[in-house]
Image (cartoon, rainbow, N blue to C red):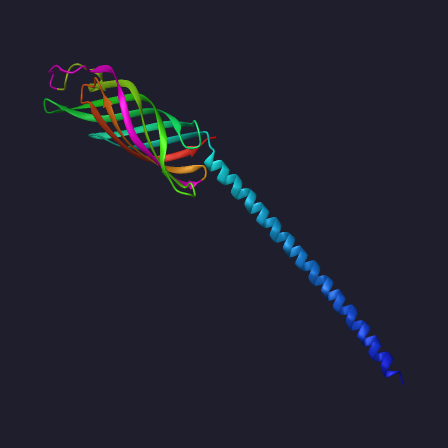
């Protein structure tokens, strides 16, 4: 019969080795999990920082909007060039398509204009997902009445200049609601003052569309 003390000593040593091995396995598993979690957090931080930086420091943006003008509809394409983090120059091409009643006849009036102005931020949230800007500038364009024809449908003479160059100024607001860092819903509201228009001096424009961050 074996010595009971020797048997208990052997069992004790075996248990110690088993515990050490289990501890090493658990420690290795824990270190692997810790490393994986730290790597994931680092990747999320890098991606989040890059997206945040990209959305806040863009230089160029293109907006395409369409909407209402007085007695008709219009469209406006603008290019924004940032001069600093919050303010930007805006250049735009605008087309307005309206009707004017002359001698009880609806006469088409088309305006094709180039706008240039300066906008500055007045409101933006901490997450930079919303921004509201105010701006003003100048405009010059071509106003075409009755498709440039001097005769109306009833063969009466049009007592307005059917085609002329108009110029003036405008002021408005520009709002952006970012869906992702490179795409935003763009809302524009402007009042345009033409010094020499044949149909009236003030022309409102309200449009909604999309803004694309280009650079």
Q: Residue at x 29, y 25 (%)?
A: 95
Residue lying furthest bottom: 1
Place of residue 3 in the rendered image (x, y in percent of width and height, measured from the top left)? 88, 83
155 is within the stretch colored magenta: yes
Relative horizontal placement of residue 180, taking residue 64 as reference (left or right): right
Place of residue 147 in the rendered image (x, y in percent of width and height, measured from the top left)? 22, 18
Relative horizontal placement of residue 106, taking residue 97 as reference (left or right): left
Q: Nearer the viewer, residue 208 or 156?
A: 208
Place of residue 85 in the rendered image (x, y in percent of width and height, measured from the top left)? 44, 32
The quarter of the displayed image where residue 2 is located: bottom right
Magenta: main secondary structure: strand
Place of residue 72 in the rendered image (x, y in percent of width and height, measured from the top left)? 22, 30
Q: Nearer the viewer, residue 129 or 204?
A: 129
How many discs appear? 0
Q: Residue at x 31, y 25 (%)?
A: 94
Q: Residue at x 23, y 14 (%)?
A: 164
Residue 50 against residue 156 in the figure, above or below = below
Residue 106 against residue 186 in the figure, above or below = above
Relative horizontal placement of residue 77, taking residue 39 as reference (left or right): left
Q: Nearer the viewer, residue 98 or 215?
A: 215
User: Which residues lie in the magenta part?
Assistant: 154-180
């Amino acid at each position: 019969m074996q010595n009971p003390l020797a048997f208990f000593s052997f069992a004790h040593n075996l248990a110690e080795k088993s515990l050490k091995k289990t501890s090493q396995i658990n420690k290795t598993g824990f270190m692997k999990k810790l490393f994986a979690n730290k790597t994931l957090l680092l990747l999320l931080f890098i991606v989040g920082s890059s997206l945040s930086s990209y959305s806040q420091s863009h230089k160029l943006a293109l907006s395409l909007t369409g909407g209402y003008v007085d007695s008709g509809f219009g469209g406006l394409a603008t290019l924004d060039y940032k001069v600093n983090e919050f303010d930007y120059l805006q250049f735009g091409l605008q087309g307005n398509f309206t009707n004017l009643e002359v001698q009880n006849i609806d006469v088409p009036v088309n305006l094709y204009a180039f706008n240039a102005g300066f906008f500055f931020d007045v409101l933006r949230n901490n997450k930079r997902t919303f921004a509201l800007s105010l701006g003003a500038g100048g405009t010059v364009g071509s106003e075409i009445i009755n498709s440039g024809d001097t005769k109306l449908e009833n063969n009466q003479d049009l007592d307005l200049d059917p085609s002329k160059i108009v110029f003036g100024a405008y002021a408005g607001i520009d709002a952006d609601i970012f869906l992702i860092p490179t795409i935003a819903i763009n809302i524009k509201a402007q009042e345009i003052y033409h010094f020499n228009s044949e149909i009236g001096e003030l022309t409102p424009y309200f449009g909604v569309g999309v803004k694309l961050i280009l650079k």
